[in-house]
Structures are given as structure tokens and as C-alpha cells.
Image (cartoon, rainbow, N blue to C red):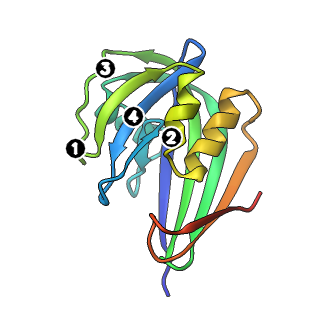
């Protein structure tokens, strides 16, 4: 089986003690909160594609990046895909919130406080909630790598294992 591969960028945009989150409506109609970001197009540089995704999803413009904070690897052998995510912290952000997601997935943008974010992230996949939660607690560095395996043939009923 040929494994499909995705490279995704995630933007960690601090807001007071919390961060900016987007509410996503998935194809299966489920709803989850994540940092803004998305698939990096072929031929696109990571930070260029991530800045594009942030602007499309939130209206915010990232001028500079503070650095990569962690990466995530998810393998789903039963579904035939591999996902790699790089999470970058924004250093300089301007603009007003507006949703212009061309994919029609993002339905909300929220400045989530440090106490609100973990509860919002509970409905997200572990490969989102675990690294973001640890980052909020300042326990991640640019060398942190989170690895997960998804077992099953559909995302809703699959079993997620944390490998590291």
C-alpha cells in the first residue's frame, strides 16, 4: 500500500496566558479546536505556507516567527497515511480577526485563555491536544517530538496510541 504523506504547519499565537484557536468542522461533521494552520502545498516553504494558512483562517498576519516549538508525527497504517506537523510560535502578529478559509473548515476563531484552552482541546485528537497542552505549560522545546499511531479504518473509531 502506498502511504499518503502530509506536511502540516501549526501556528502557536500567544494571547495573554493562552493562545488563538480555530474551531474546525470536519467532513464527518465533528467539531474540534486546533491552533490555526494547515497543509503546506508542494513547493511551498514551511513558514510561507503557514503564514498563508493563518491569514486565510484567521485574518491575522504573522510578520515574524519566534521559532519551531515542537513537531508531531502520526502514522495511520490501516488508513494508509502519515502526517507530519511542525508547530511554530509567532513572534509578531497584526491584523483583525476575520474568517476567510477557502476550504470552509474553520467556523470560529477564539482567543482562548490558558484555563479555557485545555477544555476546548479535549475534543481534538490527542496529536493536537497533548503537544499544545504541554506547550502551554512551557514543557516543550524546539526539539520536542510527539509520535502517535492511529489504529483502525476510520478516524472517529480509531484507537490512538502515543509512542513517545
Distance from disc 1 to disc 4, alpha carbons, whole Å, reads 14 Å
Q: Position of residue 116 (x, y in %)?
A: 53, 24
Identify whether 17 is placed above or below 57: above
Mark 4 vs mark 3: give the one in front: 4
Q: Is residue 156 left or right of residue 131?
A: left
Residue 97's mark?
3
Residue highlighted by disc 4:
22
Q: Which residue is mark 2?
A: 10
Q: Which class describes the residues within 10 Å of circle 1: few (<14), some (14-19), or many (20+)? A: few
Crowd around label 4: few <14 · some 14–19 · many ≥20 (10 Å) = many
Q: Earlier in the sequence, mark 1 or mark 4?
A: 4
Look at discs 1 and 4 and give the one toward the viewer.
4
Residue at 50% of width from left, 47% of height from top? 124
Tags 3 and 1 in contact by the CB under 8 Å rule? no
Mark 3, other Cα within 10 Å: few <14 / some 14–19 / many ≥20: some
Q: Nearer the viewer, residue 16 or 13?
A: 16
* Residue 16, image x, y percentages: 56, 11
Asked if disc 1 and disc 4 are in contact, CB closer than 8 Å, the reply is no
Residue at the disc numbered 1? 102
Amino acid at each position: 500500500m502506498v502511504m499518503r504523506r502530509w506536511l502540516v504547519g501549526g501556528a502557536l499565537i500567544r494571547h495573554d496566558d493562552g493562545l488563538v484557536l480555530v474551531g474546525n468542522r470536519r467532513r464527518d461533521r465533528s467539531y474540534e479546536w486546533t491552533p490555526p494552520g494547515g497543509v503546506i502545498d508542494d513547493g511551498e516553504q514551511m513558514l510561507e505556507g503557514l503564514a498563508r494558512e493563518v491569514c486565510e483562517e484567521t485574518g491575522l498576519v504573522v510578520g515574524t516567527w519566534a521559532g519551531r516549538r515542537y513537531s508531531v508525527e502520526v502514522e495511520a497504517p490501516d488508513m494508509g497515511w502519515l502526517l507530519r506537523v511542525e508547530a511554530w510560535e509567532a513572534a509578531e502578529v497584526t491584523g483583525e480577526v476575520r474568517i476567510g478559509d477557502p476550504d470552509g473548515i474553520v467556523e470560529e476563531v477564539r482567543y482562548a485563555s490558558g484555563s479555557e484552552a485545555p477544555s476546548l482541546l479535549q475534543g481534538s485528537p490527542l496529536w493536537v491536544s497533548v503537544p499544545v497542552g504541554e506547550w502551554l505549560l512551557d514543557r516543550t522545546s524546539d526539539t520536542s517530538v510527539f509520535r502517535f499511531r492511529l489504529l483502525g479504518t476510520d478516524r472517529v473509531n480509531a484507537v490512538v496510541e502515543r509512542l513517545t
